[in-house]
Image (spheres, rainbow, N blue to C red):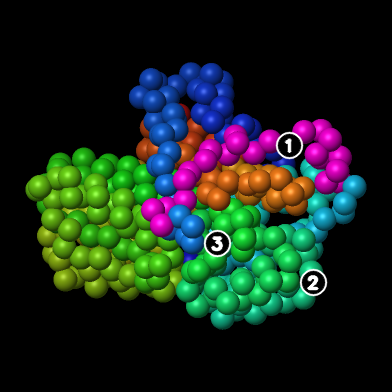
């Protein structure tokens, strides 16, 4: 898995729900592409957490409000923040961190450190303990293993540090008590969209597989598995023959190789996110197999896969916008104001047709020349 180049993001994020409309107005794009850029309605509930046995109710990012006086008050208090990431070796975490840091800077909140656990839960626990020792006012984090790491996160909460989670909540932690909020994409709908496109891509009939993370209690990824399974079950001629799991993204290559070897008639695979999906594409090419691959998440490197046709469709998160929302939620919480328990960012549907516009919405930068060249005039 290659290390992505650092993504420069000087531009501030546009208002989330207005962004697709702005993109459409600024470019002469076909109606079909413009339709894809419209955000889907959000799913009504998120992860089951204490106090919400049916799942926390979803709110959109625009519920978070800060006045000029609020911002002045934030700047006067000299708050600090730490960011404890699962990995920094992908576009998604880099965009998340960029959104957080850019937004916190507007509020005068200093980021004291950003850590990279390289997808190892033990390393992340150590990172978290070291961050707690620095006594920031707020920590932003996405737990790798929400079960084994819960105790470490509870130590942060007990130390009086406010917590804002990305996508997943550690087991047994309650919103408003142990943490401020969790900000996530609409993971189930992202996967549902991508899986439906896979079904269309194979003509509505045949064997398919799913490749996902081994931690089934990692909520955001588990929700994607649910979304993909839901889509496949709606089609009687689609047979889900295998669900493979990996512990780290690069191991998806071996999982895909085994799945494709065991199922010579397999026509398509939905993969939980883009980095392991790249490994699945590589495995299929090595075996000389032509399959349809769909996935979630989009960054400058995985946009190349869409442009080449390696990925038929992507249900994309908007990690920079999520980072902006997380920073804003932290600011509201630091002022002692209520924050909704779960904030959900709508699905962005991505195919080759709308790739350039979608990529700009995700990264806040124009698509790189490498992507534009591969599109060969077929992307908008």
**Relative to 147, is 327 above or below?**
above
Provide residue 313's location: percent of width, then percent of height.
34, 43
Residue at 69% x, 77% y is 129
Q: Residue furthest left?
A: 237
Q: Residues within 10 Å of mark 3 (few under 14, many from 20)?
A: some
Residue 174 tag number: 3
> In the image, which residues are magenta?
53-75
What residue is shown with label 2? 134
**Which is in the foreground here, disc 1 or disc 2?**
1
Which of the 4 image quarters holds residue 315?
A: top left
Point out the tag, 2 or 3, that comes first from the N-terminus.
2
Query: SS class of the residue under badge 3?
Result: loop
Residue 66 tag number: 1
Tell me: 254 left or right of 259: right
**Which is in the foreground here, disc 3 or disc 1?**
3
Is residue 56 a member of the stretch shown in magenta?
yes
């Amino acid at each position: 898995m290659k290390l992505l180049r650092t993504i420069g993001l000087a531009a501030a994020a546009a208002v989330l729900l207005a962004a697709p409309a702005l993109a459409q107005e600024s470019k002469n794009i076909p109606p079909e592409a413009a339709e894809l850029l419209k955000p889907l309605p959000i799913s009504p509930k998120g992860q089951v957490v204490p106090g919400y046995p049916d799942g926390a109710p979803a709110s959109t990012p625009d519920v978070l409000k800060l006045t000029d006086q609020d911002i002045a008050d934030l700047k006067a208090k000299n708050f600090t923040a730490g960011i404890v990431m699962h990995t920094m070796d992908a576009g998604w975490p880099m965009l998340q961190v960029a959104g957080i840091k850019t937004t916190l800077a507007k509020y005068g909140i200093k980021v004291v450190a950003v850590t990279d656990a390289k997808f190892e839960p033990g390393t992340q626990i150590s990172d978290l303990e070291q961050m707690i020792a620095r006594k920031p006012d707020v920590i932003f984090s996405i737990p790798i293993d929400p079960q084994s790491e819960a105790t470490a996160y509870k130590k942060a909460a007990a130390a009086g540090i406010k917590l804002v989670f990305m996508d997943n909540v550690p087991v047994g932690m309650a919103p408003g008590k142990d943490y401020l909020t969790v900000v996530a994409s609409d993971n189930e709908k992202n996967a549902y969209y991508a899986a439906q496109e896979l079904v269309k891509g194979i003509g509505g009939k045949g064997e398919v597989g799913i490749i996902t993370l081994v931690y089934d209690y990692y909520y955001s990824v588990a929700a994607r598995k649910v979304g993909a399974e839901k889509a496949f079950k709606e089609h009687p001629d689609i047979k889900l023959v295998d669900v493979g799991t990996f512990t780290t993204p690069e191991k998806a290559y071996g999982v895909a190789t085994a799945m494709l070897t065991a199922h010579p008639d397999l026509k398509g695979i939905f993969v939980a996110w883009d980095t392991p999906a790249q490994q699945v594409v590589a495995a299929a090419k090595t075996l000389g197999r032509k399959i349809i691959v769909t996935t979630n998440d989009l960054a400058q490197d995985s946009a190349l896969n869409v442009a080449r046709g390696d990925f038929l469709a992507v249900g994309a998160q908007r990690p920079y916008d999520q980072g902006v929302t997380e920073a804003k939620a932290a600011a509201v919480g630091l002022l002692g104001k209520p924050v909704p328990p779960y904030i959900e960012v709508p699905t962005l549907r991505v195919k080759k047709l709308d790739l350039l516009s979608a990529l700009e919405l995700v990264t806040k930068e124009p698509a790189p020349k490498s992507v534009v060249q591969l599109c060969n005039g077929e992307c908008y």
